[in-house]
Each structure stands twice: as structure tokens, then as C-alpha cells.
Image (cartoon, helix red, strand yellow):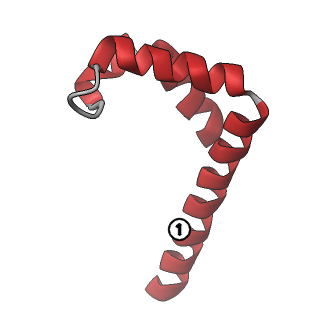
Amino acid sequence: MSSRRSDWAQHQSGITFDTFLLMMILHPEVAKAAQEEIDDVVGSGRLPDLEDRQRLPLVDCIMKEVWR
């Protein structure tokens, strides 16, 4: 049974990623604004982490919309 759960979780992760990718392709202005927000808050020396979340409202909204 856990194998079936694992397969389902993997499938859902793929759908979530596909949705995100499709939305960024269809709305390049949003992708650009999100990248600018990340660059402004985080810079180029590291990846964003949970401590950055409050300072990345657009990225947070995008992720919530994808997960919805």
C-alpha cells in the first residue's frame, strides 16, 4: 500500500511542477517580476530560504496559487 501512496505523491508532485512551469510560460511578466523580487531580497549569492518568505510576497502568492 505504501508503494501506491508513493506513486500518487510522485504523480502529484509532477502535476504541481507542470502547472507552475505552464503558468510561468503563459505569464512571462509574472515570472520576470518574481525573479526581480528574489534578486532584490536574496541577491545572487544564495538561494531563498524560509526566513525570506515574508519579504517575498509575490513568490509566496505564486506558490500558493500553484498548490491550490
> Percent from the top left, x then y, of residue 33?
57, 16
Label 1: how many residues lie within 10 Å, few (<14), some (14-19) or many (20+)?
few
Residue at figure coordinates x 58%, y 73% from the top left: 8
Instruction: State whether residue 68 appears in this view.
Output: no
Of residue 67 and residue 58, the one placed in the foreground of this image is: 58
Q: Give whichever of 37, 11 is nearer the camera.
A: 37
Which quarter of the figure is the C terminus placed in? top right
Residue 20 location (% of width, % of height) = 64, 43
Q: Amino acid at mark 1?
A: Ala
Q: Residue at x 28, y 20 (%)?
A: 42
Give the vertical position of 12 relative to 18 (above or below): below
The residue indicated by pointer 1 is 9
Task: Examine the image and state in which quarter residue 22 appears.
Answer: top right
Q: Residue at x 45, y 14 (%)?
A: 37
Q: Is residue 28 above or below residue 68?
A: above
Q: Is residue 37 above or below residue 12?
A: above
For the residue pair 4 and 36, the one nearer the viewer reads as 36
Q: Residue at x 30, y 30 (%)?
A: 48
* Image quarter of residue 26: top right
Left or right position of 25 against 50: right
Q: Is residue 20 left or right of residue 53?
A: right
| Observer able to see residue 44 | yes
Q: Position of residue 12 (x, y in %)?
A: 60, 62
SS under mark 1 = helix
Q: Residue furthest front?
A: 44
Q: Is residue 41 above or below residue 48?
A: above
